C-alpha cells in the first residue's frame, strides 16, 4: 500500500519534471539529442572528428541565434558574421591587452556585440526590415575594414593569436563548454519565445499592422529581439576566438553570414532546434565534400534556393510532419503548444 | 592639396559615381517595381564583366560591340532568372513570396559566384584599355580617353534608360506598376511581362557597368561584392525604389568615397560611409530624396 503511493508520486514527479523541461523547450527528442551529444566524446577519441563536432555545434548555435531574429520578427541580420567577429575580437583583445581571464572576455564580447546590436537596431528597426539588414551589413563591412587596417592592435590579415581557454590541448573540454553554452542559449531563447514577449515577436513577424492595432509596439520588441540575437552572436564569437586560436578579418566576411543563413533556413525558419540539427547534417557533409572546392558551395547555394522554392518550412517542417503523423495514430486532436516556433 | 590631386579626385569620384549610379538604378528599379530586395545584383555585374571580356579578348569584338553584347547577355540572364526562379516562386508562395525571393537572390548570388570560380578560375581577366590615348589639359592634369569613354557609356546608358521610362509606352507601364500594381493590372497591363522586363533591364544596366569598366576593374568571380554593397548603400541613402534619387545618389557616394579614401585610406572609408548613413537615417529616414514606396513599414 505504502509502496504504491510512493511509486505514483515518483511518476508524478517525473511527469512534472518532463512538463517543466518541455516548457523550456527540452522535449524528449531534443533532450535525447543533447544527451547523445554529451556522451559522444566518451566514444569518439579522434581529435579531428571532435573538432568537426565543435564546429557543427558552433554553426548550429549561430543558426539558432540567427533564426531567433529571422524566423520570428522577419528581419534578416546580414551583418551577423560582423557581430560574431566583434565578440571574437573583443574577447581576444581583452585577454591579450588587459590580461583578464577568458571568461571575463566572454562577457566582454557578449556585451560589445549586444551594445552595437542595440544601437544599430534602435536606429533602423523602426523602418522596413531591409534597413536593419543593410545597416548591419555595412557595419560588418566597417568592422572588417577596421580589423584589417588597425594592424597595431589586431595584426590585420596576419592573424591575431588568441590564448586558449585553459592549459589543455584536447578538444573534448571545448566541446563540453560549447555544449553547455548551446543548451543554455537554447533554453533561454525558447523561454523568451514561449513568453509574452515571444508572442509579440510572432505577432510582428506575421502581421505587423495587426500587431500594431492590438497595441504591440513593434519597434520596442524588434530591438529587444535584435539585441539578444547580436549578444548571443558575440558570445559564440568569443568562444570561437579561444577555440580556433587565430583570428583574421576574413571571419567577418559576408559569406559566413550566408552560411549561417542557409543553415537556419535548411533547418526551418521559425524554429530554434531546426538549425542546430541541420548543422550536424550539413557541416560534416560539406567538410567531407571539401575536395570538390567551389562545386560544394554551388551545391550549398542550390540547397538554399531549393528549400526556399520547394519547401520553405525546411527540415523542422519535415520532422514536425512526421511527428504529427505518428502522434495522429495515438492521441487524436489534442491541441498542444508546440515546443518552439511558428506552427503552420 | 594640389590642383592635380583635386583633379584626380574629381575624375575618380565621377567615374565611381557613374558605376554606382548604373548599379543603383537597376536595384532601385527592381525595388520599386517588384519590391524584391535583390542581392544578386553584384553577380549580374560580374556576368557583364565576363561577357565583355569574352567578347573583346576572345572573340575580338570592338569595344562598343563588346559592351553591347555584354548588355544583351546580361539582359537575357536577367530574364531567365525571373522566369526560372521568381515567376514560379511568385505563383507558389503567395504573400510570403517577397521574403522568399529575397533569400533566393542571396542563394543565387552565392551560386553564380562559385560557378564563375569553377568556369573562369580565380584569375583576374582584365584588359589594359578599350581605347588608347589621353587628353592632357595641362602637364599634370589629364584624363585617358578610356576612362572618359567608360564614363560616357554610363551616362548614355542611364540617359537612354531614363528616356525609356519617360517616353515609351512600356516605360510608362513599368512606372504604372511601380506606383500601383493592382491598378496597373486593372487597366490591362500584363504584370508578369512587366516584372520580367524590369528584371532584364535591371540586370542589363548592371551588365553594362561590368563590361564598361572592365579596363578599370578586371573580371573576377567575387568582384560583385563591393558594387553590391555600394549600390545598396546608394539606394538606402537616396530612398528605396527611387530611380532618380539613385542616379544623383550614385554620384554623391562616388565622390564622397574618393574623398574619404584620399583623406583617411581604405578601411576607414567604410566607417565614414556608415557614419554618414547613420546621420541621414537619424535626420531623414526616408532617404535624401525620400520616395513613397508601397508598404513603407512592411518588411
Image (tube, coloured by chain):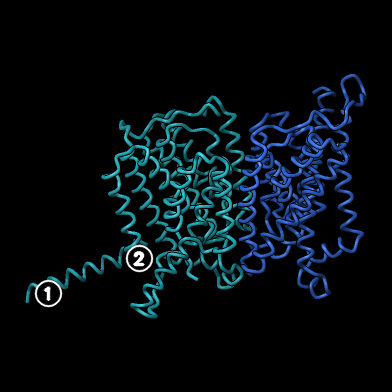
Query: Where B219 falls versus B237 (above or below)?
Result: above
Above or below B263: residue A39: below
Task: Identify the chain drawn in cyan.
Answer: A
Q: Residue at 79% of width from left, 72% of height from top?
A: B185
- N-terminal of the pair, mark 1 or mark 2, is 1
> B283 or A234: nearer the eye?
A234
Residue at 37%, 72% in the rendered image: A326
Residue A244 in picture, x, y percent from top left = 42, 35
Give the structural element (helix, strand or loop) at label 2. helix
Residue A150 in view: yes
**Which residue position holds label 2?**
A23
Would residue B255 be visible to someone looking at this image? no
Q: Colour of chain B?
A: blue
In this figure, which residue is indicated by the disc labeled 1?
A5
Give the percent coordinates (x, y) of residue A133.
Answer: 61, 52
The Cα atoms of the two marked residues, 1 and 2, are separated by 27 Å
Residue B207 placement, left or right of B228: right
Residue A132 in picture, x, y percent from top left: 61, 52
Amino acid at each position: 500500500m505504502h509502496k504504491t503511493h510512493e511509486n505514483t508520486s515518483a511518476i508524478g514527479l517525473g511527469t512534472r519534471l518532463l512538463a517543466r523541461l518541455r516548457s523550456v523547450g527540452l522535449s524528449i527528442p531534443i533532450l535525447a539529442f543533447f544527451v547523445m551529444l554529451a556522451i559522444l566524446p566518451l566514444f569518439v577519441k579522434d581529435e579531428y572528428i571532435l573538432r568537426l563536432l565543435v564546429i557543427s555545434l558552433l554553426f548550429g548555435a549561430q543558426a539558432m541565434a540567427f533564426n531567433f531574429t529571422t524566423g520570428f520578427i522577419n528581419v534578416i541580420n546580414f551583418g551577423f558574421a560582423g557581430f560574431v567577429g566583434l565578440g571574437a575580437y573583443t574577447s581576444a583583445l581583452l585577454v591579450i591587452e588587459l590580461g583578464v581571464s577568458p571568461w571575463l572576455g566572454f562577457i566582454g564580447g557578449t556585451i560589445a556585440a549586444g551594445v552595437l546590436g542595440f544601437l544599430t537596431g534602435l536606429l533602423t528597426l523602426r523602418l522596413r526590415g531591409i534597413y536593419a539588414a543593410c545597416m548591419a551589413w555595412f557595419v560588418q563591412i566597417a568592422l572588417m575594414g577596421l580589423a584589417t587596417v588597425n594592424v597595431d592592435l589586431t595584426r590585420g590579415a596576419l592573424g591575431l593569436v588568441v590564448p586558449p581557454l585553459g592549459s589543455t590541448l584536447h578538444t573534448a573540454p571545448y566541446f563540453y563548454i560549447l555544449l553547455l553554452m548551446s543548451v543554455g542559449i537554447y533554453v533561454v531563447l525558447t523561454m523568451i519565445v514561449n513568453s509574452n514577449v515571444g508572442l509579440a515577436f510572432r505577432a510582428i513577424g506575421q502581421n505587423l499592422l495587426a500587431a500594431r492595432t492590438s497595441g504591440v509596439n513593434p519597434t520596442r520588441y524588434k530591438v529587444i529581439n535584435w539585441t539578444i540575437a547580436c549578444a548571443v552572436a558575440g558570445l559564440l564569437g568569443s568562444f570561437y576566438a579561444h577555440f580556433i586560436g587565430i583570428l583574421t578579418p576574413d571571419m567577418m566576411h559576408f559569406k559566413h553570414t550566408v552560411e549561417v543563413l542557409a543553415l537556419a533556413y535548411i533547418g526551418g525558419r521559425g524554429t530554434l532546434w531546426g538549425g542546430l540539427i541541420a548543422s550536424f547534417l550539413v557541416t560534416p557533409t560539406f567538410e567531407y565534400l571539401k575536395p570538390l572546392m567551389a562545386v560544394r558551395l554551388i551545391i550549398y547555394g542550390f540547397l538554399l534556393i531549393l528549400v526556399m522554392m520547394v519547401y520553405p518550412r525546411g527540415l523542422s517542417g519535415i520532422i514536425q510532419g512526421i511527428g504529427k503523423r505518428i502522434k495522429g495514430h495515438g492521441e487524436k486532436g489534442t491541441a498542444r503548444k508546440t515546443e518552439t516556433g511558428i506552427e503552420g | 592639396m594640389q590642383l592635380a590631386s583635386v583633379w584626380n579626385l574629381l575624375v575618380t569620384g565621377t567615374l565611381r559615381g557613374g558605376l554606382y549610379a548604373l548599379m543603383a538604378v537597376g536595384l532601385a528599379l527592381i525595388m520599386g517595381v517588384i519590391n524584391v530586395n535583390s542581392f544578386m545584383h553584384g553577380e549580374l555585374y560580374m556576368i557583364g564583366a565576363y561577357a565583355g571580356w569574352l567578347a573583346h579578348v576572345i572573340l575580338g569584338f570592338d569595344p562598343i560591340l563588346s559592351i553591347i553584347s555584354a548588355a544583351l547577355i546580361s539582359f537575357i540572364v536577367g530574364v531567365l532568372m525571373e522566369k526560372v526562379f521568381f515567376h514560379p516562386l511568385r505563383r507558389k508562395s503567395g504573400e510570403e513570396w517577397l521574403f522568399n525571393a529575397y533569400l533566393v537572390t542571396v542563394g543565387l548570388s552565392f551560386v553564380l559566384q562559385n560557378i564563375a570560380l569553377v568556369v573562369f578560375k580565380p584569375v583576374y581577366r582584365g584588359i589594359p584599355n578599350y581605347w588608347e590615348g589621353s587628353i592632357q589639359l595641362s602637364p599634370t592634369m589629364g584624363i585617358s580617353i578610356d576612362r572618359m569613354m567608360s564614363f560616357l557609356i554610363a551616362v548614355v546608358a542611364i540617359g537612354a534608360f531614363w528616356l525609356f521610362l519617360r517616353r515609351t509606352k512600356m516605360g510608362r507601364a513599368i512606372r504604372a506598376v511601380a506606383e500601383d500594381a493592382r491598378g496597373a493590372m486593372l487597366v490591362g497591363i500584363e504584370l508578369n511581362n512587366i516584372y520580367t522586363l524590369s528584371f532584364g533591364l535591371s540586370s542589363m544596366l548592371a551588365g553594362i557597368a561590368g563590361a564598361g569598366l572592365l579596363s578599370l576593374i578586371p573580371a573576377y568571380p567575387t568582384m560583385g561584392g563591393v558594387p553590391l554593397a555600394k549600390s545598396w548603400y546608394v539606394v538606402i541613402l537616396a530612398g528605396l525604389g527611387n530611380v532618380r534619387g539613385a542616379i544623383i545618389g550614385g554620384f554623391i557616394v562616388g565622390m564622397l568615397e574618393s574623398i574619404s579614401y584620399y583623406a583617411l585610406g581604405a578601411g576607414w572609408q567604410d566607417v565614414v560611409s556608415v557614419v554618414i548613413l547613420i546621420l541621414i537615417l537619424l535626420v531623414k529616414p526616408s532617404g535624401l530624396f525620400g520616395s513613397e514606396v508601397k508598404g513603407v513599414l512592411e518588411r
